[in-house]
């Protein structure tokens, strides 16, 4: 933990606003994410979920307010943003593995290039990570030869190789065939149980209910509702959240 | 058949000299095309509006003027302006700068073919922009760029003949063939060997491109 962090908070949204042109996408977001917490962000399409994640690791810049990671302002990080990103992992809907690298190289590239880990150490770590995500035999394959579920597990391993304090997931199972969703969710569940701090954008409400500590529901760039999953599913306060729950559960 | 060999053996020194001039000409144009083309492509992918404009201006200018017009313009124009420019320099310069516009476009589309997702993934690992370019974008872009680049180079080799004739270039392969032809009137034989000379350049170029394409193909 950085010494400036308010006790226990790893991520702090502080009146964050973000627009794309005239389109206000994040409208005064306030949210603290504690160390070790697993949060699910839910909301209708276009509500700003991806943007929220991308602001955390500075892939998008915020217009006003402040956003702190581990006590340090991401918004005002300047060149230090690269170092901060090294402590956060991100997993994308479309995997985004590097197609010109083997599975092993995909995982070792970050640590060797960014953190100066030796080739040998990073390889050892990569092998362990591949075991952890259940595909040690694929080390020398290229991403194109893997199924979607396997690719996504490699992507998780790639992110974990940086030994991040925070993992960001943007609809990690939305591009997967139904029979592969489970294998990816299982890896994520293990991570959460080991105490990894996670922010997960997903429509998998089963996962949300069983694994996460808190659901944050956003609509039109505003946090409409937040609370433990049971609470959210049973008695959502706002009409929008109620409609959303109805739609998802009776889908 | 006998006449074919006879023409070659009798005029071999001239043919060889002409061939070497064409080689040099092509080599110089190639160098200019690649260096300027890469530079202009870099301008066009830089996130700075004014640089992009300059790059676009270059590409649109050189792509939209016929090569021969460009050639006469540079040669006559520069001489008129009191700049002593040789035929070789004007020719190789025009061909190089003209080809550079296409090279720039090929490289640019190769870079843009690498999706935003790749850049996001790379940045999210903590890579800087230069690291992202070097380790993720360029290795993938090179693969898409090689085939169109090969076509451009072959077109450039063939264009070199047009330029030689237009400028009355001192003794490149085609000019040499014309001179031999006007002395011997063995048109078929003479231009047969000229064609062979150009094939000696274009066929290896084709194979080099195929080889590179295979070698750089994403392994699986
Ligand atoms: N780079 C961008 N430029 C312009 N507008 C953007 C950009 N990225 C997102 N937007 C807009 O911002 C709004 C929120 O987008 P965002 O991707 O954050 O939504 P989302 O909640 O993740 O949606 P989905 O469930 O469809 O993924 C949308 O209206 C989108 O069109
Ligand atoms: Mg999204």
Image: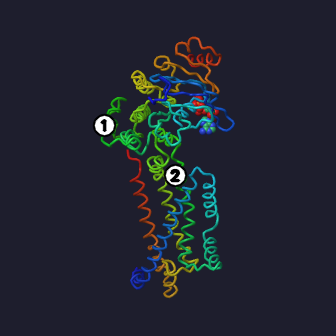
Q: Does the CB distance between marks 1 and 2 fall below 8 Å?
A: no
Say whether mark 2 and mark 1 are on the same chain: no
- Percent of width and height locating residue A97: 44, 39
- Percent of width and height locating residue B130: 48, 49
- The outermost residue toward the top is A234
Foreground: B144 or A66?
A66
Where residue A64 sits, quadrant-wise, is top right
Q: Is residue A122 left or right of residue A220?
A: left
Q: Is residue A225 left or right of residue A155?
A: right
Q: Residues within 10 Å of mark 2 (few under 14, many from 20)?
A: many
Q: Is residue B134 above or below residue A186?
A: below
Q: What residue is shown with label 1?
A: A124
**Which image quarter is the N terminus of chain A in?**
top left
- Percent of width and height locating residue B24: 46, 74
Residue drawn at (63%, 68%) of the image: B66
State ligand 1's quadrant: top right
Foreground: B154 or A105?
A105
Whether the residue under disc 1 has CB within 8 Å of ligand 2: no
Q: What residue is shown with label 2?
A: B110
**Which image quarter is the C terminus of chain A in?**
top right
- The outermost residue toward the right is A22
| Chain bearing mark 2 | B
Confirm whether residue A233 shows in the render: yes
Residue drawn at (46%, 43%) of the image: B127
Q: Residues within 10 Å of mark 1 (few under 14, many from 20)?
A: few
Of badges 1 and 2, the one in the foreground is: 1
Foreground: B102 or B122?
B122
- The outermost residue toward the bottom is B183
């Amino acid at each position: 933990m950085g010494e400036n962090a308010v006790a226990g908070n790893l991520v702090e949204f502080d009146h964050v606003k973000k627009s794309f042109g005239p389109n206000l996408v994040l409208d005064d977001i306030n949210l603290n994410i504690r160390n070790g917490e697993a949060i699910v962000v839910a909301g209708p399409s276009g509500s700003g979920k991806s943007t929220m994640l991308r602001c955390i690791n500075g892939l998008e810049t915020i217009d006003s307010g402040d956003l702190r990671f581990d006590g340090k302002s991401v918004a005002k990080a300047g060149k230090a943003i690269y170092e901060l990103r090294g402590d956060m992992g991100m997993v994308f809907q479309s995997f985004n593995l590097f197609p010109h690298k083997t599975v092993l190289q995909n995982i070792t590239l970050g640590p060797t290039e960014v953190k100066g880990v030796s080739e040998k150490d990073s390889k050892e770590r990569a092998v362990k990570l591949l075991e952890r995500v259940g595909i040690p035999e694929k080390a020398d394959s290229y991403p194109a030869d893997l199924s979607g579920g396997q690719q996504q597990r490699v992507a998780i391993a790639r992110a974990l190789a940086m030994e991040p304090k925070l993992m960001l997931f943007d609809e990690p199972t939305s591009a997967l065939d139904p029979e592969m969703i489970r294998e990816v969710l299982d890896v994520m569940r293990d991570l959460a149980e080991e105490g990894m701090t996670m922010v997960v954008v997903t429509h998998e409400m089963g996962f949300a209910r069983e694994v996460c500590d808190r659901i944050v529901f956003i609509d039109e760039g505003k946090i409409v509702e937040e609370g433990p999953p049971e609470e959210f599913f049973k008695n959502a306060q706002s009409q929008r959240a109620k409609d959303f729950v109805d739609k998802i559960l009776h889908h | 058949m006998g006449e074919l060999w006879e023409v070659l053996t009798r005029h071999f020194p001239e043919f060889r000299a002409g061939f070497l001039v064409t080689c040099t000409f092509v080599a110089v144009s190639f160098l200019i095309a690649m260096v300027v083309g890469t530079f202009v492509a870099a301008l066009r992918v830089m996130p700075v509006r004014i640089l992009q404009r300059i790059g676009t201006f270059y590409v649109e200018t050189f792509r939209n003027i016929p090569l021969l017009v460009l050639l006469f313009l540079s040669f006559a124009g520069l001489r008129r302006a009191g700049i002593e420019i040789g035929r070789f320099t004007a020719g190789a310069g025009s061909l190089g700068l003209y080809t550079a516009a296409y090279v720039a476009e090929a490289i640019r589309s190769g870079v843009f073919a690498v999706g935003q997702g790749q850049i996001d993934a790379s940045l999210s690992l903590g890579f800087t922009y230069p690291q992202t370019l070097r380790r993720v974008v360029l290795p993938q872009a090179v693969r898409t760029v090689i085939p169109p680049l090969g076509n451009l180079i072959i077109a450039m080799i063939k264009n070199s003949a047009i330029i030689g004739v237009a400028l009355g270039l001192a003794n490149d392969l085609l000019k040499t063939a014309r001179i031999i032809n006007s002395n011997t009137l063995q048109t078929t034989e003479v231009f047969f060997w000229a064609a062979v000379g150009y094939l000696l350049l274009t066929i290896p170029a084709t194979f080099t491109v195929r080889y590179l394409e295979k070698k750089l193909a994403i392994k699986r």
